[in-house]
Amino acid sequence: MSKKIIVLNGSPRKNGNTSALVKAFAEGAESAGNSVTEFFLDRMNIHGCKGCFGGGKNPDSPCVQKDDMDKIYPVYKEADIVVLATPLYYWTISGQLKCAFDRLFAVAECDPDYRNPKKDSILIMAAEGYGFEESEYWYDRLEKHLGWKNLGKILCGGVMAVGDVEGRSELKEAYELGKSIH
């Protein structure tokens, strides 16, 4: 059975190492019959969460702010799997990804008990170094809090310049992870 996959790509580099990992993952997932919709967050107009608790009144446009999140909300709600893709910035996810993910709280506000939709998820990260521990800690706790299930993590350290990921085993791992989704 094919799955609907949303990729929230928090990299500022459209052709960078994170994006190369996302591309390999998407190729694998699509080869297995899944649909993949990627949002390149850096090129979108997305404002930070105001913490106003004013969302949830309109399921089609759950946040009171009107920006490009309205393109993401319907795909997110329909998705079976959420892929969080980001470079490692100061031992955690990029601001682009954090900003968009915080705004998904408006979808939880549509539920009277503030429950988030149940999803499976994947973490894809690229980094100059290898210190993924803080990001994994955040991701693991996020999943537990949301009641999501981890399908895998692709953590590719030692890549900084565009193209450094080429020839790395993590590209094949990303492809195989995507291909394994049924």
Image (tube, rainbow, N blue to C red):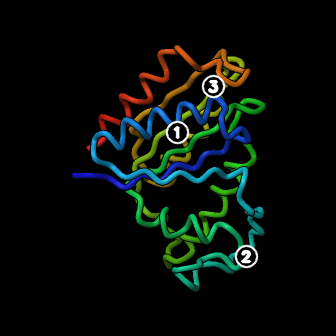
- State left or right for residue 175 relative to residue 96: left
| Dots 2, 3 in contact, CB < 8 A | no
- State left or right for residue 32 relative to residue 91: left
Distance from disc 2 to disc 1, alpha carbons, whole Å, reads 29 Å
Q: In percent of the image, x 55 and y 68: which residue is there?
A: 73
Q: Earlier in the sequence, mark 1 or mark 3?
A: 3
The circle on residue 140 is 1
Q: Earlier in the sequence, mark 2 or mark 3?
A: 2
Q: Quadrant of the C terminus?
A: top left
Q: Earlier in the sequence, mark 2 or mark 1?
A: 2
Q: Residue 138 in the image: state x and y as whole percent.
A: 61, 39
Residue named by callout 3: 132
Distance from disc 2 to disc 3, alpha carbons, whole Å, reads 32 Å
Q: Residue 91 in the image: state x and y as whole percent.
A: 72, 30
Quadrant in which residue 48 is drawn: bottom right
Q: In percent of the image, x 54 and y 34: which residue is there?
A: 124
| Local secondary structure at mark 1 | helix
- State left or right for residue 157 relative to residue 13: left
| Local secondary structure at mark 3 | loop
Compared with residue 66, is residue 178 higher up or lower down, i.e. above or below? above
Residue named by callout 2: 65
| Local secondary structure at mark 2 | loop
| Dots 2, 1 in contact, CB < 8 A | no
Q: Residue 86 in the image: state x and y as whole percent.
A: 64, 38
Give amino acid for label 3: Phe
Give amino acid for label 2: Gln
